[in-house]
Amino acid sequence: MWTGQIRLPFPSFGYLFVLVLLVGNEVWAQQPCTSIPALKSQAVSSIFGSEQERMLGDIEAQFVEQNYLVLHDDESAAHLNTVARRIFSQLPSEQMRVRIILIDTQEPESFSVGPERIYLARKMIRLLKNDDELAGLLGHELGHILTHQNAIMVSALFHEILRVNSVSDRKDISEKFTRLLDSIDGNKKMLWKASQVMERQEAIDQYEADRVAIFASAAAGFSAQAFLDLFERSAGTNGRTRNLMTDIFAATSSDERRLREIKKTLMQLPKPCREIAVASSKEFRTWQAAILSNSDQAAQ
Ligand SMILES: [Zn+2]
């Protein structure tokens, strides 16, 4: 998720970008920006198998769509899909039918739910300046999906809140998910416990998703720097970073640490890949204006 407003999904460590760790800059420099580090898949902390993960996504989507206004705008979908296809084709997501769903929210938000859905708020689209930023944002959400962060986060919540360590069919998952929400709702102690679980896992999740965004952007020929620009603008960190010492001796906001990680990841790209310029696109501006101005979109 981009802003951390909704936190149904998520998890942690693990899938390092193995090639980045093993392959030095020299080797990278000889390659075009078309290859990105491999994701190491993990299933260690998730109690959901792939079919169960899909079911969980359906159940969560139902919950999300009861609480947010879903926008239907077929005309605007074409441009969004063009950018999404470029990013998604860099990652092993072909077999997953990831859909992008436009919603209206109070704050600029984007988040992924289960393995098949990315929710993108109109207020988030308003924040974007170009296709390169859109690409980075989609890459970030896809990063959450590819590393199964949603299923891992729910696994942790099931364990900590419900003492549940396994799931079976759709009915069972739905019943447990509803019980989870009921347990947290109006119970301060449980809410605190749940937020501890989520905060613990979220920071690392974001780093991973940011990494996917940066590598996938460059591989797809977008400006990876644009992802940093978007982050700085939306997180309001204004480019401030602190060094390791201040991390130890003084509290820094997670946004600042995240900013530093993003800059570090950018530096891991070969120079030519890092320096891809933002493309000025009339299509982007037309698409953005159409979405923002269309107040007649049917809501369901
Ligand atoms: Zn995120």
Image: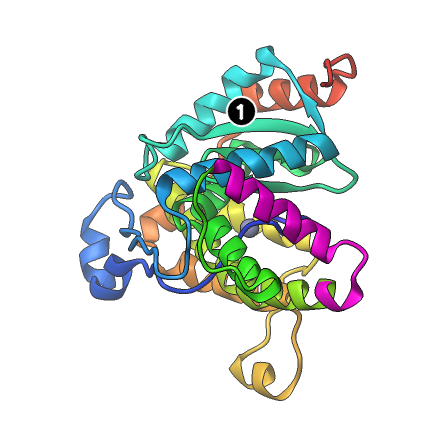
Q: Amino acid at mark 1?
A: Ser
Outermost residue to the bottom: 249
**Percent position of residue 71, x then y:** 68, 21
**Percent position of residue 233, x then y:** 67, 50
**Percent position of residue 37, x then y:** 28, 52
Between 63 and 288, which is closer to the camera in this rendering? 63
Residue 193 lies, with reference to residue 170, above or below; the image says below
Can the viewer see residue 289?
Answer: yes
Q: Magenta span: helix, strand or loop, mainly? A: helix
- Circle 1 sits in a helix, a strand or a loop, which is it? loop
Residue 177 magenta? yes
Drawn side of residue 91 relative to residue 83, left or right: left
Q: Residue at 39%, 60% (x, y): give it.
A: 267
Q: Residue at 58%, 12% (x, y): give it.
A: 74
Q: Residue at 52%, 61% (x, y): give it.
A: 156
Q: Which residues are magenta?
A: 170-190
On the image, numbered disc 1 is attached to which residue? 281
Q: Quadrant of residue 259?
A: bottom right
Residue 193 lies, with reference to residue 290, above or below; the image says below
Drawn side of residue 40 relative to residue 66, left or right: left
Residue 142 magenta? no
Q: Quadrant of residue 183?
A: bottom right
Can the viewer see residue 137?
Answer: no
Drawn side of residue 146 relative to residue 292, left or right: left
